[in-house]
Amino acid sequence: MREEDREVNAGPAPDRRRRSIVAALAAGSTATFFGPWKVHHAWAQAAQRKPLVVGLTMDASGQYAASGGMERLGAMMAIKEFNDKGGVLGRRIEAIHMDTETTPATGSRVAERMITRNEAAFLIGAVHSGVANAISQVAQKYGCVYFNTNSSSPTESGKDCHRVKFVWDGNGTNFAHAIVKNAIRVNGRNWVLLTNDYVWGHNTSKATRSLAEANGAKIADELLVPQNTRDFSSYLLKLQQLKPDVVATAVGGDDIKVLRQQVVQVGLHKRMAWLNNQQDWPDVYGLGPEQIFGVFGTTWYYRLDLPGVKEFVAAYQKQYPGMAIRVPGNVFYNGYVATRELLRAVEEAGTTNNHAVIRKLEGRRMTARDRMQHFDAWIDPATHQCQQTIYMAAYNDQAAEKDDIFRIMAQVDAKDVVDQDAPKSCRLETFEATPTYEQ
């Protein structure tokens, strides 16, 4: 990673228009600061005048580059709002971004550099759960609070939980609870699982299998799809032979875009029901109506009839005029609300000290109105996952406008989709075992 790989020179996708938008956000905050600011009282006083560095650990390349770009813009909009009000604790916020490349090894190197060389006070970002897990291990080693904004493997708040890590998105188990029972009732009991062959895919399909079988479905087969697959013909041929009632996919990023296109080409979207555990907005935006087939989960939609939603959409469009994605989706939303809540907790704690900030976050309650969702949310103190409203959606064939491509079929209260297994496998480190960290 080069020193010039800063948020000011990065964007959500490799085009100049988007890079210039992000550059405009971070203009005037490009300096890098080195040195142990808290060694001496005089240093500590000077630190209050130095920027508060936030490390953005989002993909700009690889399978989840599109989502990484959008969650980064969400985080930057929240940061700008705080900077417009004077920053946090009297310190302007400086965001530094490094591409995690949808690769765990890169995520680990990025986290190590941001903490040890850039003196990041906090880390924010991730879509790929393997990358999130790698970042969190480094963060825990140093005690740096890390917000996993968009990766959804149940293991992130289960066996791979950490005292410094907070998981912001719904996970595969939450989404499975919201959609599996209804799919069995409406579509049938003969199921096939189509699974991205990495941690999120495996654990999401595991949750789907468990719920489906508990409710009377039979899993005829599970087809494992390597990441970055671009030819799904062998999998589609197998589905033609198996003839399931339901295909339950845990496929994401660029892979799901290609899968959707090829399913439509051979007409399988009309011959069996399709469930996509979770559908991220950047992975479906711009696809034709036929390719947005099936039922899927999400955590937010830009046309929810709730207080604050229209204003939020307007703020996005003002901040990022001319974007290819004209309205914000769930990934942008998660990046924004996660960053906003972290910075609020820092203000409430009155310090960047990690132990103090963690205590402000554990068990934190957030109102539905504040989060622009249907039900109140909270951060589970046992797992550090944000428990929130889950929406079940499908393609909207009666769109109110061009971008209105989702039809929200149901909204499910967080208490009805809680992952009951996560607390059994999550063992948060004690505060005594978590290094004190403060910038």
Image (cartoon, rainbow, N blue to C red):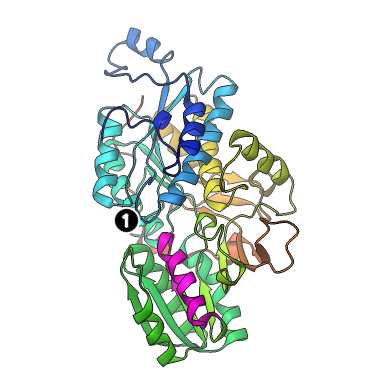
Q: Main secondary structure of the magenta part?
A: helix
Q: Let me know if residue 165 is in the magenta part.
A: no
Q: Which residues are magenta?
A: 249-269
41 above or below 370?
Answer: above
Task: Please state if 412 lies on the left or on the right of 207 as rendered.
Answer: right
Q: Position of residue 10 (x, y in %)?
A: 41, 35
Q: Is residue 111 visible?
A: yes
172 above or below 110?
Answer: below
Q: Is residue 433 visible?
A: no
Q: Which residue is mark 1?
A: 130
| SS type, badge 1 | helix
Q: Nearer the viewer, residue 81 or 314?
A: 314
Q: Position of residue 127 (x, y in %)?
A: 41, 52
Task: Please state if 438 lies on the left or on the right of 287 as rendered.
Answer: left
209 above or below 110?
Answer: below
Residue farthest to the top, as pictured: 42
Q: Let me know if residue 252 is in the magenta part.
A: yes
Q: Nearer the viewer, residue 348 or 185?
A: 185
175 above or below 145?
Answer: below
* Amino acid type indicated by mark 1: Gly
- Density class for disc 1 (Cα within 10 Å; few <14, some 14-19, many ≥20) is many
Residue at horizontal 67 percent and vertical 48 percent from the top: 372
